[in-house]
Amino acid sequence: MAAEALLGEVEEKCRMTIKALESEYLAKKEEVARRAAEQKSYIQETGRKEAEAAAQREKARIEGAAKLQAKKMIFEATEKGLESNLAALRQVLADYAESKDYQNMLAKMASYAEKKLGAPIGVECRPSDAAALKKLGAKVTSSDLSSIGGFRAASKDGNLALDLTFEELLRTHDEDVRAAILGTE
């Protein structure tokens, strides 16, 4: 019987050891499952935050590109409108150069040139303005100027010159003209 008691004792120890191992196994299994759930949750949260950040960056990029495109379109439309208005202004000046009032303006311009350059002045003008400028006392050096209106003047000795053509006046006052057209004076 001693062998049976010993065998019973060994079996009982085995059962207790197996039970302890099973408990330890279940505890470790629960710990691994808990850690896996924590890591899964951490990975999901990190992924969600990274996706949100990436979406925000992409949204900002798209909005920025759209705003830039809109500004470009507005700028192009404004420039097109300006060019159209400048062309209309050139036409108005061309019409004015054919009016009776233009002769008065031509006299004022000649007087201005004489004050700046000294009398008498030499002028390069349009064929249609040559007679009027001669009457005003200017020496017409050339009457083949291609211009909307106005003239180019030079001092008697030729050292000083003044460009009073409508094109040059528009060019030198370009910013003011554009501001006036846009109404931003």
Image (tube, grey):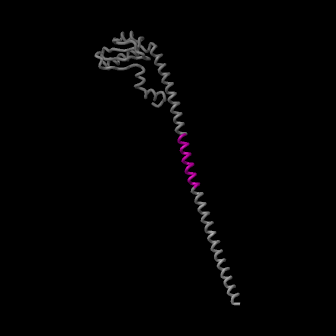
Residue drawn 40% across the image and 19% down it = 165
Using the image as rendered, state which of residue 104 and residue 118 is in the foreground.
Answer: 118
Using the image as rendered, state which of residue 39 and residue 119 is in the foreground.
Answer: 39
24 inside magenta stretch: no
Residue drawn 29% across the image and 19% down it = 159
Percent across and percent down for residue 18 are: 66, 77
Q: What kind of secondary structure does the magenta stretch mostly adopt?
A: helix
Quarter of the image where one finds residue 66 = top right
61 inside magenta stretch: yes
Q: Which residues are magenta?
A: 47-65
Quarter of the image where one finds residue 108 = top left
Quarter of the image where one finds residue 123 = top left
Percent across and percent down for residue 169 are: 40, 22
Above or below, comparing residue 123 to residue 175 in the picture: above
Residue drawn 60% across the image and 65% down it = 35
Residue drawn 64% across the image and 72% down it = 25
